[in-house]
């Protein structure tokens, strides 16, 4: 692990929800799983990940995400578009566990079903998560990272006002040397910048 900092993570007794004009960020439901599994089986959604996820792997990942929200009250929420789409993906906050120079950190993340792309929904929902992290959790900084090639995700980071410094770029520790997608870009946003 890298930076010599301690993260104090505020927890809440019950899962929190965030609302924006078009989105609801909420705790996951069992009924989200079919759409979540279909999304993670979509090669276009998983284009900048190492592989698509099989049903079991996807269910396990959803379980870990849901447990993290149950534990802290916040996390990678299920994204609902009220009146339109019961489940459109996930957006929120993740306590990074990889061994990287910028850890410990809380990162912003997003993964949307293809039908929800191109409407500004990832940015709108991530803005709410960002405000929550700064106002309620009182975090000093948020990060986000993705493969160098994942320009759509970097565009979300830029729309959120996050800054990229090439000196922070890193090789993802869980992607083997020589594999495509290993090189990652890190973006940061300080609380004072919002
Ligand atoms: C990364 C990802 C969430 C980005 O989704 P996105 O739809 O491009 O991002 P946004 O929700 O911010 O939408 C922005 C787009 O909506 C358009 N848009 C349309 N209506 C809009 C509105 N009312 N408000 C804002 N933007 C709008 C914008 O012009 C922009 O389009 P452009 O990229 O053609 O310029 C999506 O590509 C994805 O889920 N990818 C797969 C998973 C992934 O890679 N996750 C990141 C891993 S680190």
Image: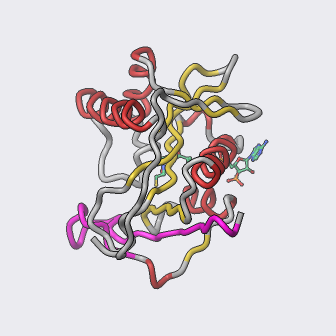
Q: Residue furthest bottom?
A: 167
Q: Nearer the viewer, residue 45 or 106?
A: 106
In the rendering, at what x and y percent does residue 194 appear?
71, 63
Residue 172 placement, left or right of 168: left
Which residue is located at x 77 percent, y 33 percent? 21
Task: Give the answer, above or below, for where 171 lies relative to 46.
Answer: below
Residue 99 is a magenta residue: no
* Looking at the image, residue 174 lies above or below residue 9: below
Q: Looking at the image, which residue is at 27% across and 70% down?
A: 1
Coloring scheme used: secondary structure
Residue at horizontal 46 percent and vertical 41 percent from the top: 75
Q: Is residue 19 left or right of residue 73?
A: right
- Front one among 84 and 95: 95
- Residue 149, horizontal then vertical, whole percent: 47, 65
Residue 111 location, x and y as percent?
A: 49, 43
Q: Picture coordinates of residue 104 (x, y %)? A: 37, 64
Farthest residue, direction left = 176
Residue appearing at x 45%, y 61% in the figure: 146
Q: Is residue 183 magenta?
A: yes
| Closer to us: 24 or 58 | 24
Looking at the rendered structure, the number of numbered marks drawn on it comes to: 0
Q: Which residues are magenta?
A: 170-193
In the foreground, 159 or 51: 159
Q: Is residue 26 left or right of residue 28?
A: right
């Amino acid at each position: 692990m890298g930076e010599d900092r301690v993260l104090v993570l505020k927890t809440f007794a019950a899962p929190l929800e965030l609302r924006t004009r078009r989105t609801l960020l909420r705790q996951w439901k069992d009924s989200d799983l079919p759409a979540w599994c279909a999304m993670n089986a979509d090669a276009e959604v998983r284009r900048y990940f190492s592989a698509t996820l099989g049903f079991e792997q996807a269910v396990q990942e959803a379980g870990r995400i849901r447990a993290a929200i149950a534990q802290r009250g916040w996390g990678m929420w299920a994204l609902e578009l009220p009146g339109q789409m019961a489940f459109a993906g996930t957006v929120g906050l993740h306590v990074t566990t990889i061994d990287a120079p910028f850890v410990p950190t809380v990162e912003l993340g997003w993964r949307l079903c293809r039908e929800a792309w191109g409407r500004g929904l990832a940015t709108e929902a991530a803005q709410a998560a960002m405000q929550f992290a700064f106002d309620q959790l009182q975090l000093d900084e948020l990060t986000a990272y993705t493969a160098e090639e994942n320009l759509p995700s970097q565009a979300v980071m830029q729309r959120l006002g996050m800054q990229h410094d090439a000196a922070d770029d890193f090789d993802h520790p869980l992607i083997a040397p020589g594999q495509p997608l290993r090189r990652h870009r890190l973006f940061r946003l300080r609380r004072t910048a919002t």
